[in-house]
Amino acid sequence: MESHTIRQGIISLLSEQELDARDLSQELGLKEKDIYEHLAHVARSVAASRGRFVVTPSQCLLCGYVFKDRRRLTRPGRCPQCRRSKLQNPSFRILT
């Protein structure tokens, strides 16, 4: 993967399987925070090339609340319904 840019690597991985930012950071050897910055650009690149950038939203593991209307790609801090912070990370996939 040395000849790929970071964003090309993200696109390649997400085209094969659904992953969250933690999985991507481990695969690419980057900080999770840096992955989120790249994901916004990847989403625009995929849309420009007629692909689909699919986000599976975060979900509260305690009460089941789904963050379906959230626009940010990052993990929310806490659940607005039960006020707890036991949340599943959002995951991403690219469909062509």
Image: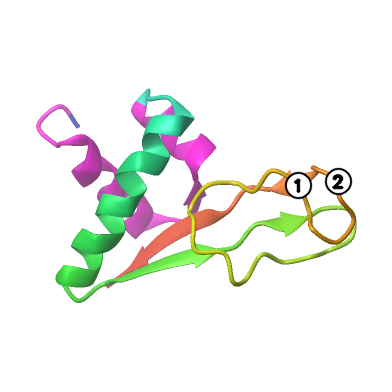
Q: Is the magenta stretch mostly helix, strand or loop?
A: helix
Q: Position of residue 3 (x, y in %)?
A: 9, 32
* 5 drawn magenta: yes
* 17 drawn magenta: yes
Residue 61 shown left or right of residue 52 in the figure: right
Q: Of 41 and 52, which appears nearest the observer? A: 41
Q: Name the residue under label 2.
A: 84
> Looking at the rendering, which quadrant does residue 82 occupy?
bottom right
Query: What range of the chain is rendered magenta?
Result: 2-28
Q: Name the residue under label 1.
A: 78
Q: Position of residue 25 (x, y in %)?
A: 43, 31
Q: Where is residue 91 in the image (x, y as percent from the top left)?
A: 53, 54
Contact flag, marks 2 and 1 (Cβ < 8 Å): yes
- Disc ID at residue 38: none
Q: Of 81 and 12, which appears nearest the observer? A: 81
Q: What residue type is labelled 2?
A: Arg
In the rendered view of the protein, which quadrant contains the N terminus?
A: top left
Residue occupying the far bottom of the picture? 50
Residue 2 shown left or right of residue 78 in the figure: left
In the displayed structure, 34 sits above or below 43; it is: above
Q: Which of marks 2 and 1 is nearer the N terminus?
A: 1
Q: Where is residue 85 in the image (x, y as percent from the top left)?
A: 80, 42
Q: What element carries label 2?
A: loop
Q: How crowded is mark 2: few (under 14 residues within 10 Å), some or many (20 or more)?
A: some
